[in-house]
Amino acid sequence: MTIGEAVRLRILALCAERDITVNKLATICGITQSSLSNIVSGRNRGATVTTLKKICDGLEITIIDFFNAELFLQLEQELR
């Protein structure tokens, strides 16, 4: 699994936990719905740290909380 895939899955899981849509999360976070949609659909293979911070702020979690998930332990090495 790549970091982009893990971020995508984590965002979707956090939305499901909170029973909110991706569009609602975008509104809460102050980022465009198209930007967040591109991240969770896989069209954008990575999110910037700034975008992740906005997502975390909207979800009222820390960056540490965001990355504190089992799926981040299964990442492939991305040296290319």
Image (cartoon, helix red, strand yellow):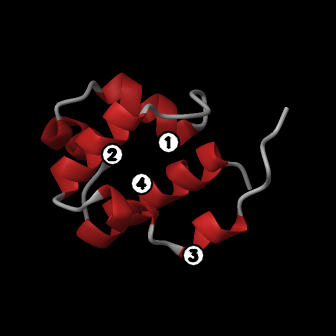
Location of residue 55 by image quarter? top left
Circle 4 sits in a helix, a strand or a loop, which is it? helix
For label 1, the residue is 40
Residue at point 29%, 43% (across, down): 53
Q: Is residue 75 left or right of residue 4?
A: right
| Other-residue count near label 4 (Cα within 10 Å), few / some / many at <14 / 14–19 / ≥20 | many
Mark with earlier residue (2, 3): 2
Mark with earlier residue (4, 2): 4
Residue type at mark 4 is Ile
| C-alpha distance separating marks 2 and 3 | 22 Å
Which percent across, then down, holds residue 19? 25, 66
Q: Which quadrant of the figure contains the N terminus?
A: bottom right
Location of residue 13 by image quarter? bottom left
For label 4, the residue is 11
| C-alpha distance separating marks 1 and 4 | 7 Å
Which percent across, then down, holds residue 12? 44, 56
Q: Nearer the viewer, residue 64 or 9?
A: 64
For label 3, the residue is 70
Mark with earlier residue (4, 3): 4
Foreground tag (4 vs 2):
4
Circle 2 sits in a helix, a strand or a loop, which is it? helix
Mark with earlier residue (1, 3): 1
Asked if disc 2 and disc 1 are in contact, CB closer than 8 Å, the reply is: yes
Residue type at mark 2 is Val
Circle 3 sits in a helix, a strand or a loop, which is it? helix
Asked if disc 1 and disc 4 are in contact, CB closer than 8 Å, the reply is: yes
Residue type at mark 3 is Glu
Above or below, 38 relative to 67: above
